[in-house]
Amino acid sequence: MNQQDWMLMHRVAAGDEAAVVELYERFSSLVFKVARQLLPTRPEAEDAVQEIFVRLWQTADRYDPRRAKLVTWVMLIARRHLIDRIRRNAVRRTTTTYQAEPGTAKTDHGPDYSPQEDERNSRLLQQLAGLPELQRVVIERAYLYGFTLREVSEQLEAPLGTVKSALSRGLARLRERAKADWAM
């Protein structure tokens, strides 16, 4: 049990501003990195980080160092918040209408729109389409739709270990392809 982490979270729960700053300084870059990977725009990721740290502050009294390291607990809270946010955004995205042919979608773009986002999303979808079916389905359900791996396992009626392996292999392939794209 890490006594320092427990004391930090105890101080955060008590409203100690210095403790909140310390918590933010320790974990904000990690939380931002994950948020940026999962959310479509930088401003949305920045907003999510703020919301995550508010949630950490509000739930600081629930941290138990005997159950998890502080980094694990912070990332669990962050992951849950990001999944909730992705699900909310998916429900709100009703402005996209699809034409009969693929690639001819019309979208009402918001204030954070940049053409690079469309290009990046298009490349990602192409790379996903090139994966074996199980890997593609697992990544889509886990990252795009926010299901837990256990939920994906149940949906696919596949062992959890198989789903985890498919996710790992699929992400490795996407990383390799991304490196190859950057090298070009």
Image (cartoon, rainbow, N blue to C red):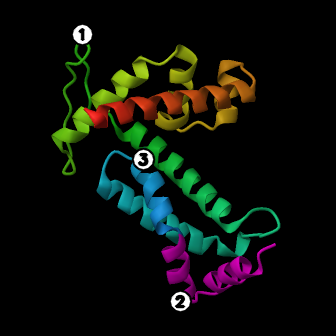
Residue 160 on image: x %, y % = 73, 29
> What residue is shown with label 3?
37
Residue type at mark 3 is Gln
Q: Nearer the viewer, residue 138 or 85?
A: 138
9 is within the stretch colored magenta: yes
Q: Give how far apart the Cα atoms at labels 2 and 1 are.
A: 56 Å
| Residue in the picture at 63% in, 38% down | 148
> What residue is shown with label 2?
18
**Category of crowding for the residue at label 2, using alpha-carbon neighbours closer than 10 angstroms: few (below 14), some (14–19), many (at least 20):** few
Which residue lies most toward the front here?
A: 183
Residue 55 on image: x %, y % = 55, 67
Q: Give how far apart the Cα atoms at labels 3 and 1 are.
A: 30 Å
Residue 105 on image: x %, y % = 22, 23
The quarter of the image holding the C terminus is top left
Main secondary structure type of the part rendered in magenta: helix
> What residue is shown with label 1?
100
| Residue in the picture at 23% in, 10% down | 101
Q: Nearer the viewer, residue 64 or 29?
A: 29
Of label 2 and label 1, which has the lower sequence position?
Answer: 2
Of label 3 and label 1, which has the lower sequence position?
Answer: 3
Circle 2 SS class = helix
Q: Which residues are magenta?
A: 1-26
Determine contact: label 2, label 1, CB under 8 Å: no
Of label 2 and label 3, which has the lower sequence position?
Answer: 2
Residue type at mark 1 is Ala
The quarter of the image holding the N terminus is bottom right
